[in-house]
Amino acid sequence: MASLFSRFLKRSKTEDEDFDPWPKHPDFAAHFRDPLYDDEADDLAPFGNDEGWDLLAEWAKRSDELDSGSTLAQIAAEWFEDAPLVPADLNEDNVDLNDIVIGAGFTLLRLTGQIGEADRALVLRALDIRDRTYGQQRETQQMRTDLLAFGRSG
């Protein structure tokens, strides 16, 4: 499996561009199939807002620094500088932080094909808060359903 991941990382970088904005780990590509995971214009898609896009763009260039042990704290270090975030740290008052957590979670999944349980809980909490902030939206429901099922079936 490590060789498959290594081949994926090499393939995700191109010589004629700084980075490929849409690299996908094979596990991510197999599970997260909805078009919203490639939507760069929908603010509710993981990479459609500034926070999500910036995280993906930065880490697609730096994907060689990621591995199966990478975390949200690594992906969004400036937001996690004092201590690891816990779900109770997230609330409706900080929309940017919720978007960072969602973007970082799906960047981690997209580039490494994994997410730890503590990080999964953070992303799920951010999605719940997004529902309370904007009302239930198809994109948020799809991300929640996919995230809950990822790595837990078959």
Image: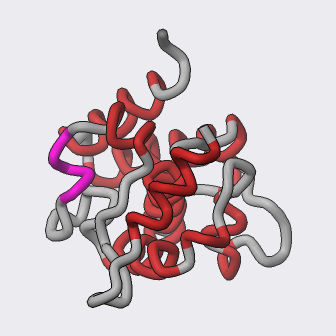
Position of residue 148 measured from the top left corner of the image (x, y, whole percent): 47, 26
Query: Is the residue 1 above or below the residue 43 in the image?
Result: above
Instruction: Say how many tags the image has.
Output: 0
Query: Is the residue 1 above or below the residue 79 in the image?
Result: above
Q: Residue furthest right?
A: 83
Q: Residue at x 47, y 28 (%)?
A: 150
Left/right placement of residue 91 relative to residue 29 reads right
Q: Residue at x 51, y 40 (%)?
A: 124
User: Which residue is more in the foreground, 108 or 19?
Assistant: 19
* Among the 4 quarters of the image, the one containing residue 72: bottom right
Residue 92 visible, this orientation: no
Magenta region, main secondary structure: helix
Query: Is the residue 118 above or below the residue 44 in the image?
Result: above
Position of residue 105 measured from the top left corner of the image (x, y, whole percent): 52, 54
Left/right placement of residue 60 relative to residue 79 reads left
Left/right placement of residue 112 relative to residue 12 reads right
* Among the 4 quarters of the image, the one containing residue 137: top left
User: Which residue is more in the foreground, 130 or 152?
Assistant: 152
Q: Residue at x 26, y 56 (%)?
A: 45
User: Which residue is more in the foreground, 117 or 153?
Assistant: 153
Residue 99 among magenta residues: no
Residue 36 among magenta residues: yes
Position of residue 125 measured from the top left corner of the image (x, y, whole percent): 54, 43
Q: Residue at x 73, y 71 (%)?
A: 80
Residue 137 visible, this orientation: yes
**Highlighted magenta segment, given as a residue range:** 34-38
Q: How is the image coloured?
A: secondary structure
Quadrant for the N terminus, please: top right
